[in-house]
Amino acid sequence: MPDMNTIVGSHDLLMITLDTLRYDVAKLEEANCPNLCGTGSWEKRHTPGSFTYAAHHAFFGGFMPTPANTDKASHVRLFHSRNTGLKTHPHTWLFDTPDMVSGLAAEGYRTVCIGGVIFFTKKNPLAKVLPGYFQQSYWRMNFGVTNPRSTENQVQHALKLLKQIPPEEKLFLFLNVSAIHGPNRYFVEGAREDSIETQRAALRYVDQALGPLFEAMRERARPMFCLAFSDHGTAYGEDGYQGHRLAHDVVWNVPYREFVL
Ligand SMILES: [Zn+2]
């Protein structure tokens, strides 16, 4: 694992949740995702939550998806709250706030959220909770699940914001990508329902749309440490299950990557 105590402070941070992306779908499209997988493969992990709201509370609490193996020694946390009484790894970055987002703000980071799915819309009190972790948060109708160009719209918004943020200012940018979440059938012409095929097509679209964001990040003063992963998968009829917020292999197995841009 990277030494997070050398990353925090010297790098910008980019966290991308590829909402609802299944692990098996991510693996099938690895060769077609030069932006997300240009430097390596997806790692199989277990999500701490079976739907967006639960999973993101865990992430912002510093609990990233756990490696899907039985070797407990490999389950080293990147972020951990200080003074829990638990022994932590020397490479783990400790924060002294209720969550890692405000912990990074306390280290001088500007924290920015670009929302995607319903829990980031800020349209009712519940949908303000997750964006409320951040100093700045944004959601537009065209960032949401019903817009077939949502990722491009989210990236355009991020690029506009980046122009206003001095390149030497420390930045933690969080992006919740909505395009892979249902409905995603419109990524395959003529498809009548969401499926593994339509989710694969949505992922290819997302990877391409992220290109300009990665390019802009590379132009900033600091290198960018990027975390890209899914918050949960979804069932397309396996064992009779549909959707998520339930416990099934296709929901709790998620793709995970960390890399430096
Ligand atoms: Zn989700």
Image: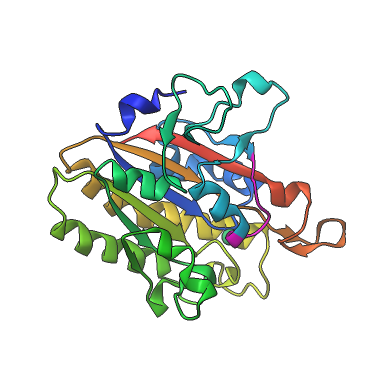
Instruction: Please provide the residue range marked out in magenta.
Output: 46-53
Q: Quadrant of residue 150?
A: bottom left
- The rendered magenta stretch, by its main secondary structure, is classed as loop
Is 47 part of what is drawn in magenta?
yes
- Which residue is at a point 30% across and 48% down the rendered structure image? 105
Q: Nearer the viewer, residue 107 or 229?
A: 107
Q: Is residue 151 visible?
A: yes
Q: Quadrant of residue 37?
A: top left
Is 49 part of what is drawn in magenta?
yes
| Left or right of residue 81, residue 69 in this image | right
Residue 220 is situated, as x and y percent measured from the top left of the image, at 17, 43
Q: How is the image coloured?
A: rainbow
Residue 227 is situated, as x and y percent measured from the top left of the image, at 43, 41
Q: Nearer the viewer, residue 143 or 174?
A: 174
- Which residue is at a point 50% across and 42% down the rendered structure image? 62
Determine whether 88 is above or below 61 in the image. above
Q: Quadrant of the C terminus?
A: top left
Determine whether 43 is above or below 13 in the image. above
| Left or right of residue 113, residue 230 in this image | right
Q: Ligand 1: give its quadrant.
A: bottom right
Residue 5 is situated, as x and y percent measured from the top left of the image, at 35, 26
Residue 246 is situated, as x and y percent measured from the top left of the image, at 77, 58
